[in-house]
Image (tube, rainbow, N blue to C red):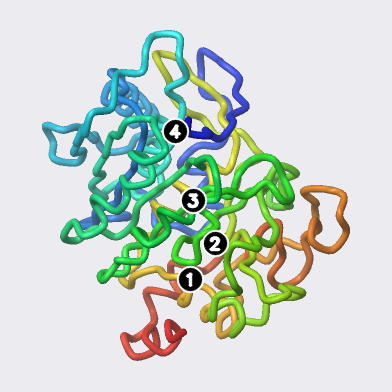
Amino acid sequence: MDLAALKHMKSAASSPSGLTPQDLWKMYNLPGLNGGKGQLIAEVIDGAIPTMESDLNAYSRHFGLPECTVASGCLTIQNQGGKHIPNGSDPAEGLLDVQLMHAVAPQAKILLYIMNSDNTSIAKGPADIIKTPGLKAINMSYGFDGNGKQFEALYNDNPNHVALFGASGDDGYGQITPPSIYPGVIAVGGTVVNGTTETAWSGSGGGLTNLYAEPAYQTKYGIPRANGLRGNPDVAAVGGTPVAIYELGKWQGETGTSVSAPIWTGIAALVNKPITNELLYGLAKSQPDSFNDITSGTNGKCGFYCTAHPGYDYVTGLGTPKNFVANVNALTPAQAAALSQP
């Protein structure tokens, strides 16, 4: 079975066209250049990209971010047999993810874990590194074929509560795949940004999956009309508006929930508590200003389940970050533990 890669829409340019790191900092109330110090986040991809470091540092230099290289200790690359992506192929996934993670948490260290492109290898990748000391989050901007039930247990052996962020998909309502459907994964949908307004993106993957029962954290929150099933996504970030990425010596404008997921992975490095779905849903109930509640836009023509509305919805989940970083960092350990109860 082949890896079912998420789609990207792109436009090439000789200068950046799209949202910048500074735009993301402003949109989501992030700390900026000082964010992520002392934290470790990871990316799992299915092929080695020879220009990873050079493209990352061209991006960093342009936007005034700190250098992130193997030599500086910021970037660690572990290749477990992934082949070089050949010239002419699309290396956007890995470049996009790593550049956005660095944009959101410029001081964080990044572990790049490279696998083969078959389902089994890419599905097991997160499990291989989930117990890495100090790891805060793993980004998974991909989906794989089938229902993935045979791999789900790998993601549950997570004693350190590493946040697992999965892109919810780019084909709208009902087109959701593993790993984002797993109850132990935080599924990330997409939005469109127009000035200071954020609406649901038409491609944001969402809906109910009959493969998993409604998790306790969604029942406790009270997601609407779940019919006892797992709802997707859990949260969202910009995905339908292009972000500027440096790829193979030129600028691209990239879209998709492959943009949204690494933004949240970077955010995990900005907070002093583990991010779990239990914490997200608990915080949305106790401190709703943690999220920008997306209340307009659709991802299909199925009425309620395809429409953003106040509270949780099946297009953007709980919403996008608003005062999330500040609110989580202000929690005492006891408060965080209480919110994180199933």
Q: Nearer the viewer, mark 2 or mark 1?
A: 1
User: Residue beneath label 1, please?
Assistant: 277
x and y, in percent, of residue 305 in the image: 79, 61
Residue in view at x 30 percent, y 66 percent: 157
Q: How many marks?
A: 4
Residue nearest the observer in this picture, 127 or 14: 127
Residue nearest the observer in this picture, 100 or 66: 100
Q: Is residue 6 left or right of residue 150?
A: right
Q: Nearer the viewer, mark 1 or mark 3?
A: 3
- SS at badge 3: loop
User: Residue beneath label 2, please?
Assistant: 321
Residue in view at x 61 percent, y 82 percent: 219
Q: Distance of mark 1 from mark 3, alpha carbons? A: 20 Å
Whether label 1 touches label 3, CB < 8 Å: no
Q: Nearer the viewer, mark 4 or mark 2?
A: 4
- SS at badge 4: helix
Q: Earlier in the sequence, mark 2 or mark 3?
A: 3
How would you rate the neighbour count of disc 1 (Cα within 10 Å): few for under 14, some for 14-19, many for 20 or more? many
Q: Nearer the viewer, mark 4 or mark 1?
A: 1
